[in-house]
Amino acid sequence: TALTAEGIQSSMNATLDGTEENLVGYWKFDSTNTTTAIDRSDEGNNGVIMGEVTPGETRFHIQTPHQGALFFDGTDDYIDVDSTHELSISGGAFTMEAWVYYNGSNTDENTVIDKDGQYRLYIENGHFALTSDDSASVAFNDTEMMENKWYHLAAVFDGTNTTYYLNSEADGTSTDFVLGAENDNNLTIASSYDSADFFSGSLDELRIWRVE
């Protein structure tokens, strides 16, 4: 797999240097830049911050895992990242992980990461799931998350099975997810591709790992 359970547990509270093997996207949200979300991986998949975001709104200094997070208002704030080969996963295994602080004000689907047509990680009714346009059904993690609390989410796809991890503990396995075909659609963070299903709350340490 792109990241093992042991790897998730050992790195979830650590700051990476960005050169780790198989790491293709790493948005730390540790910069005061309010126009660009810098990708700290070697791939340089920087994103454009959309919405009227100010430093006071974006920097959440409650007790976050890494003392830096980006706040999204659930209405029109999101990040747009150009499509690259590294993000357009063509097959094999991959892992997506993020720290999330879900405030519950948006009762619809709350998108964490979306690569239209290929994969989408989102929260709905306190549970998270990995899905795609090619997935016939959607399976969520087992444990319901509380509002206004930090959680670490991870979805590990091995090519057939998806295993969910909540705070590094295995929290459900499914075969429902089907990886969509590689495409040139942009990747969005905190919103679906069509500027809908916005995330309401804070995100930190978003990471994508893949294995060809």
Image (spheres, rainbow, N blue to C red):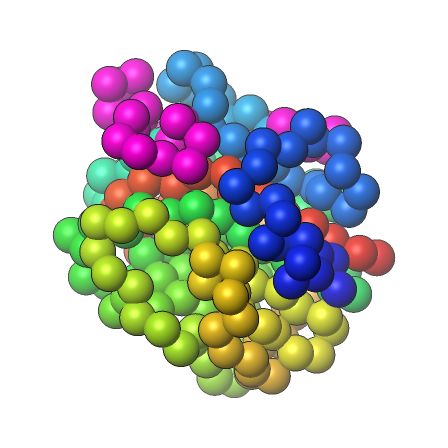
Camera-nearest residue between 50 and 34: 34
* Residue 41 appears left or right of 50: right
Helix, strand or loop for the magenta stretch, by majority:
loop
**Residue at left offset 47%, top offset 84%:** 137
**Residue at left offset 58%, top offset 72%:** 163
Taking the magenta stretch, the answer to whether it contains residue 59 is yes
Rendered position, 60 above or below 116: above
Camera-nearest residue between 93 and 8: 8
Rendered position, 28 above or below 33: below
List the single residue furthest toward the left. Answer: 105
Taking the magenta stretch, the answer to whether it contains residue 50 is yes
Camera-nearest residue between 44 and 68: 68
Rendered position, 140 above or below 55: below
Q: Position of residue 194 (x, y in %)?
A: 40, 52
Where residue 3 sits, quadrant-wise, is bottom right
**Residue at left offset 72%, top offset 42%:** 23
**Residue at left offset 77%, top offset 46%:** 22
Specify the segment rendered in magenta: 40-69
Q: Where is residue 124 in the image (x, y as percent from the top left)?
A: 31, 67
